[in-house]
Amino acid sequence: MATARKGSSGNQTALLACVLFACLLGLCGKVAALAPDWSHWYDTVFQHVDTEHGMPNASVTALAQDGEGFIWVGTQDGLARWDGYRFHNYQPRSQDRNSLPGNLVFALHTDSKGRVWVGTASSGLARYERSIDGFVRINGISQASVFAIEDDGAGGIWAGTWGGGLNHVDPEGRIQV
């Protein structure tokens, strides 16, 4: 007899839980129906940008956002910084030691200080410096093709190269191969 009471009590509890759940679902539907329709107050803005808008090349190879909010776009023919309105392009210039070291950008990375690091296909690693609106080239990387860049968690970075393995750049800019 006691077993039968337990079973029916369990069935009643399960039935009560189902009824409460159904009521909760109905209430959620009514609350959602009462929520204001904000769609007329905003437009979802997606803008397709390409070479017609100032990008150096339409083939994007890397993306990063720096500490100031700029979007950096690596391409097969240079680097572009997007400010939300227009692109500022960076290209290699043989007479300018602060220019982008190579035109094919394979990797971009923003470090813990908000600085952008650039890995190129054949010209190594560089770091963007706001004060000169240019790049500081990192000499001594084991191989000129830098395909990946990542933080080390202590203020330095790791640079992955094609055929030259990993290189560590410490916070002072010294390289350990």
Image (cartoon, grey):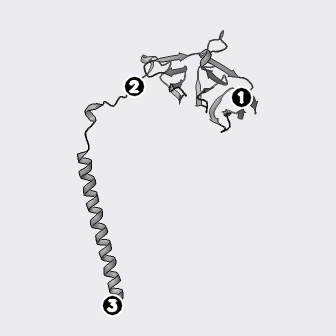
Q: CA distance from mark 1 to mark 2?
A: 35 Å
Which residue has dot 2 on it? 48
State the residue at coordinates (39%, 25%): 48
Q: Amino acid at mark 3?
A: Met
Q: Nearer the viewer, residue 73 or 144?
A: 73
Q: Nearer the viewer, residue 168 or 31?
A: 31
Q: Secondary structure at mark 2?
A: loop
Instruction: Say which label, 3 or 1, has the lower sequence index.
Output: 3
Q: CA distance from mark 2 to mark 3?
A: 73 Å
21 relative to 103 in the view: left or right: left
Q: Amino acid at mark 2?
A: His
97 relative to 41 in the view: left or right: right
Classify 10 Å Cα crowding around label 3: few (below 14), some (14-19), many (20 and above).
few
Q: Amino acid at mark 1?
A: Gln
Observer-side mark, 2 or 3, equals 3
Q: Position of residue 28 (x, y in %)?
A: 28, 53
Q: Position of residue 24 (x, y in %)?
A: 28, 59
